[in-house]
Amino acid sequence: MRDFAGRTAVVTGAGSGIGRALALRFAAEGMRVMVADVEKDALDGTVDLLRARGAEAAGRVTDVGDEEQVFALADFAYDTFDAVHVLCNNAGVFAGGVIWGRPAADLEWTLRVNLWGVVHGIRAFVPRMIAQDTEGHIVTTSSAAGLFVPAYSSAYTISKFASYAAAESLAHDLAAQGSKLKSTVLCPGNVNTKLPGSGRNRPAALAAESSPDAEFLEAALGDTTGRGIEPALAAETVLEAIREERFLAFTHPEYADYLRGRPDEQLSGAVPQTPPLG
């Protein structure tokens, strides 16, 4: 897909970070943009930015972990813009800590957003996008932690490996059906976003007390987040991947060497190395 002007993009998790950067980048290409986020004030800020730049834009508060809300988002997008050509299942949350030390609520929460948010988006939008019979693209925001396994990030890493698998399953299913749609998975490293503070949106029913290992990682992320790449660079990576119909897109080129070495490490019986994710 190379022509973006006049077409429609839907971006979840668009209140800040990569999601907002994607929305602004699509608008710069002349696209109409539907944005969603669980935080109303942040979402309204993105809509205001888009409209200030002359884009045709609308927003809807959406908890992507709630299937009904995602299907309602799809209805709203089609009622507003008649068609969707790019879908970015981007919303994500983070929980850290060692795998034996954190409660099941951590995994329930991260899977609810990072995996089920992707699955709900695919199920709500892709059948309609196929029925349009136009070219289009679905982008899943996974993570470098969907390729490599860092310590102290078990719930997040499990959810991101799962979202990667969902994106690849989508790619194979679309190809097997001869669809005009394509799938890309974005695996960013450290990006200057609010992801480390995503606990602010954690449902009360899935709340959990902190622990020393989780606090250690939270402090480390707080120290490094400001040194991550800017979200606009991640958005540019996505645009290039869509244009080139590339499945895997990552923000840090050095990850390629670690990916090449990973199969040899696995076959040797060694625990695969994890690159610095910053």
Image: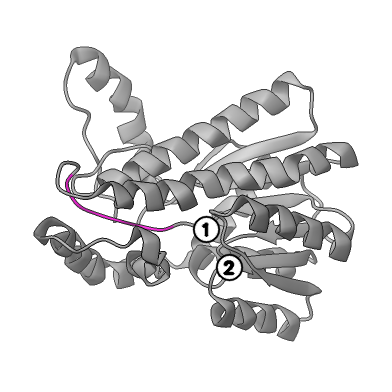
Q: In whole angstroms, how far apart are the C-alphas of marks 2 and 1?
A: 8 Å
262, above or below 94, in the image:
above
In the orientation shown, which residue stands out farthest toward the left?
A: 212
Point 73% across, 51% down: residue: 86
For the C terminus, the quadrant is bottom left
**Direction from residue 259 to residue 218 in the image, left or right:** left
Point 89% across, 42% down: residue: 132
Q: Earlier in the sequence, mark 2 or mark 1?
A: 2
Residue 141 vs residue 30, the one in the foreground: 141
Residue 27 vs residue 70, the one in the foreground: 70
Q: Can residue 274 be found in the magenta stretch?
A: no
Secondary structure mainly formed by the magenta segment = loop
Amino acid, disc 1: Ala
| Location of mark 1 (residue) | 91
Q: Label 1 near label 2: C-beta < 8 Å? A: yes
> Can the viewer see residue 254?
no
Label 2: element kind: strand
**Direction from residue 26 to residue 105 in the image, left or right:** left
Label 1: element kind: loop
**Direction from residue 215 to residue 77 in the image, left or right:** right
Amino acid, disc 2: Asp
What's drawn in magenta, residue-wise? Answer: 93-98
Point 18% across, 68% down: residue: 219
- Residue 18 image position (x, y, % from top left): 51, 63
> Can the viewer see residue 89?
yes
- Residue 227 image position (x, y, % from top left): 30, 69
Quadrant for residue 260, please give it.
top left
Q: Can residue 96 be found in the magenta stretch?
A: yes
For the N terminus, the quadrant is top right
| Location of mark 2 (residue) | 37
145, above or below 35, in the image:
above
Point 73% across, 69% down: residue: 27
